[in-house]
Image: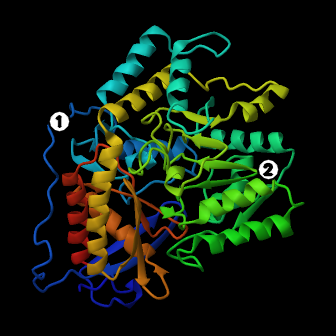
Amino acid sequence: MVHGFISPWRRVLSETTYSLRRGQFGRRRCFSLVAHKAELDKNNIDSVPKLPPFDYSPPPYTGPSAVDILSKRKEYLSPSMFYFYQKPLNVVDGRMQYLFDENGRRYLDAFGGIATVSCGHCHPDVVDAIVNQTKRLQHSTILYLNNAIADFAEALANKLPGNLKVVFFTNSGTEANELAMMIARLYTGCHDIISLRNAYHGNAAGTMGATAQSNWKFNVIQSGVHHAINPDPYRGVFGSEGEKYAKDVQDLIQFGTSGNIAGFISEAIQGVGGIIELAPGYMPAVYSTIKKAGGLCIADEVQAGFARTGSHFWGFENHGVVPDIVTMAKVNLLTVMGIGNGIPLGAVVTTPEIAEVLTRRSYFNTFGGNPVCTAAGLAVLKVIEKEKLQENAHVVGSHLKERLTALKDKYDLIGDVRGRGLMLGVELVTDHKLKTPAKLETLHIMEQLKEIGVLVGKGGFYGNVFRMTPPLCFTKEDADFLVDAMDYTMGKM
């Protein structure tokens, strides 16, 4: 076995010193790395992996450089906007699962715009739908009739189980979750909502309350949300025993509320939280408890929905439950969801009975259901079906997970490999017993992967989990290149 990266604080010898910038927190830490001088063993890759061939070259880029853009960004955009890499990437073109920088260099996009790009960058069918609708009518209002919103709502409802067939369109995942929580409170007449620790549901007033990571919460009033123990099979106190975690929800209801609640909101796989798939048996047990307390069950499908998990179209289906409300989107179609392949679009879907609560007052969203966005959404659904992207997510995702698991057996630095389909996570730790987060090592590997031509995301509370959520057109060759690049990088550490 090739052992993982040694603690940076104990490195004495050095050939190159790397300064890794934590963009989110604005801190710098330095450590030294020593490349292996001995010949790599026969299981190691002895040459830099090469990108799979791809028949596309972008037109020459004539716009401003990365340096110029970064300068403007620092002067005119919010300082809260952080970025990856010591030298931020200037992405100017994209085709399917690949992105191109200002110099025309190609990168394998294993992050998919934060699980947003489902069909592939600039998929011709989606582009045509957007262009054709824009030429005919760019924006209207739901006060007038238009077929784009009605057709997409019908198609979306047909992909959901049971009586989930009334759709409200929004512009992002945050908006969708805000609306879902308000509907639950109106329908039940209760205020208390239960969420999970480590969850991320948005950054507005209500959703920030449901979010349970201090990294994403400001010190403002956030009321009426109780956070249950996270059923995390890797770090959780009960391992993979979902029903034991579920008891905490019952305790929260009995000892933290009046006994009746508005609802329960959760992701099937926590995305921002580090690709954590909830422990088996947890969701059915919790849904039963919530129903007994008069609450509604909300499934946040912003990242796990739209065929990404492969085995099912929706993440919640992997747990054998049917929610009362489903949310999807996240500003890039949903910025995490793939509903619009990168178009600002979100949605809340519920039953006709529950939907009635919004008729008590006027509910309106100026851009929700915009003709261009909904035309794109319908095109995405058609592409997923036509190109069998759900099946591809299952086949390629299973292959990728298998190869990543083999890599885990090779390097001590990898503590866990998890997820489903093309929503996978690799957690790095410096100590398997203590599960000490390997934060600096994660940043170093990300930098090296970019140099080879691979873009991955990172997440988890400690920032030590690689998030792999590529476009669903990802191939086995892409998966092999990704793992070979990781193997090469880690073998050099």
Q: Which residue is mark 1?
A: 57
Residue 441 tag number:
none
Q: Is residue 456 left or right of residue 25?
A: left
Label 1 packing within 10 angstroms: few (<14), some (14-19), many (20+): few
Image position, residue 358 (x, y; %): 78, 30
* Residue at the (26%, 73%) spot, across then down: 406
Q: Is residue 23 left or right of residue 237?
A: left
The answer to whether residue 97 shows anywhere in this view is: yes
Residue placed most toward the observer, 9 or 270: 270
* Residue at the (74%, 35%) spot, across then down: 354
Which of the image's four quarters has the N terminus? bottom left
Coloring applied to the structure:
rainbow
Residue placed most toward the observer, 198 or 221: 198
Q: CA distance from mark 1 to mark 2?
A: 53 Å
The answer to whether residue 168 shows anywhere in this view is: no
Residue placed most toward the observer, 60 or 211: 211
Image position, residue 272 (x, y; %): 52, 58
Q: Which residue is mark 2?
A: 262
From what the image shows, is residue 363 above or below residue 78? above
* Eye-nearest disc, 1 or 2: 2
From what the image shows, is residue 2 above or below residue 272? below
* Residue at the (50%, 54%) spot, across then down: 82
Which amino acid lies under the numbered mark 1 shown in the image of this protein? Ser
Which of the image's four quarters has the C terminus? bottom left
Q: Is residue 32 left or right of residue 203?
A: left
